[in-house]
Amino acid sequence: MSHFSGVLAPLRGKGAELALMAFLIAVPAHANAQDTVSRHTAAQSGATLKALSTAGQAPDPALAPAASLRDRTVRGSAAYDVLESLTTEIGPRPAGSPAMARAKDWAVARLNAMGFSNVHAEPFDIWAWFKGTETAEVVDPFPQPLVITGLGGSVATSPPGVVGEIVLFKTWQALLAAKPGSLEGKIAVLTQRMGPLGSSTGYEVANRWRRKGASEAARRGAIGFLIRSLATNDLRDPHSGALNYDEDVRKIPAAALSGPDADQLERMSDRNVPIKVKFTLIPTYLPDAKSWNVVGEIPGASLPSQVVLVSAHLDSWGLGTGAIDDGAGVAIVMAAAQLAATQKPARTIRVVLWGAEETNQAGPEYFKAHAGELPDIALAAEADFGADKVLSFQAPKGTADLTPIKTLAATLAPLGVRFDPTPATFGGDDIAPLYQAGVPVISLRQDGTHYFDWHHSMNDTLDKVDPSALDQATAAWTAAIYAAADTDASFRAKP
């Protein structure tokens, strides 16, 4: 995730659909793993199932298809199996790397095995950046090691590294207030903590510090930039993420510093003695690499030319295995689309797995390649906020009173998902170009309490995923996909 930063027709006959469900859900290569996970999930989801059974809703035929999908999914979906396969067989997947090429092949094979059609990979040219040597230390007057990780896209230091006295800023505003030339020959260090999600210093604000900090430091003469890792835990495990260099200033090397090491530098600085630091970054930068957006579809039963586009990003940073960011999103949309298709919705469901989200290159490339198809995209969504439960959803502007949205709200309520009447204006980084061009988006808002403990770090691994929470999220997405696909209602804002 590089940002800060997803209804219903009459009941149809079920015989053929149940047979199709059995076929689609069967993924022989991982059947044993899925059986194990399903049993585990079923044991953990008793409270949710009880809530569903005691919700007290009158039996409404209009709710039956989506409610059936919801109940089936929350009992145990294929999502964990998909996620386990991706993170175990591929691991980290930096855009442009050999691992990303393997991930592309994995996705094509998996979508085909799950019953999708028109499965293909769409190549595009990118710049690629891979981590290499990353070291840091205090060299004077209190020699000791520091833990850093390079920011995505950073230029390299010289092989010996960059050495300089640090100028420590405890807030972003203090850095901005520094005068031009005041950091000449120095290493700027920003130690401000990122606040909780939604706070005045939450990720949506702190992300700017990481992206713009190196250029702001260089504008004032700095030779290097270190920023306290954008994380909500206190582990000595820095989180990576992209930066953006301004074209009008010199590019300087930049890295994220672990929280405990940022605190250590603050304590040293408080002693009012000059602190000299050395750090080395030797990444690999490829200006002419390649990546792919992987696509699979379930053709609509009666409105196949109209598309509900659901997506997640296949690439990840090269630290953990990308389980939270964004293997979980990949698993959610693949499993949810597969299940929604068992009810044969009217519109085509298209899954897009983005190939370079972390470096902000996949969405714009898809937009350029498919600009002529935008009128056919009825709704777009992106799952890119981890593996925890969905808590609320936002619909496109002006659609709150549409029957599909009302029905979706009623379907999701027993899962603990509330309808947020605030119009959806951001569905995800990769679909932002579609939204800006007029494609409506829906946003399923997941619990982000622990998301920034793990994302972009070595701790972004499968053990952080609760299978029952993942199934709840998949159930919400399944109902939402079916709701958007099995209707002829327009979600576009009226002129």
Image (cartoon, grey):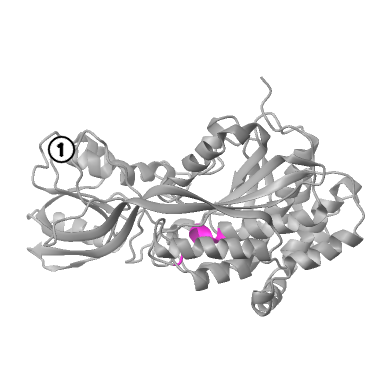
User: What secondary structure is found at the residue carrying circle 1?
Assistant: loop
Q: Residue furthest top?
A: 495
Q: Please tell me which residue is depicted at 28% across the width and 54% down the height of the picture.
A: 285
Q: In this view, does 8 lie above or below 398?
A: below
Q: Give the range drawn in magenta.
A: 321-328
Point out residue 328 in the picture as x, y percentages from the top left corner: 56, 61
Q: Which of 313 and 36 is in front in this view?
A: 313
Image side of residue 492 versus residue 240, left or right = right
Q: Is residue 425 above or below residue 65?
A: above
Q: Nearer the viewer, residue 50 or 229?
A: 229
Q: In which quarter of the image is the C terminus?
A: top right
Point out residue 367 in the picture as x, y percentages from the top left corner: 52, 38
Q: Please tell me which residue is depicted at 31% across the width and 42% down the height of the picture.
A: 244
Point out residue 308 in the picture as x, y percentages from the top left corner: 68, 43
Q: Name the residue under label 1.
A: 220
Residue 151 within the segment the image draws in magenta: no
Q: Is residue 78 above or below residue 330?
A: below
Image side of residue 231 versus residue 383, left or right = left
- Amino acid type of disc 1? Arg
Q: Which of 291 and 433 is in front in this view?
A: 291
Q: In this view, does 463 lie above or below 447?
A: below
Q: Please tell me which residue is depicted at 74% across the width and 51% down the height of the picture.
A: 479
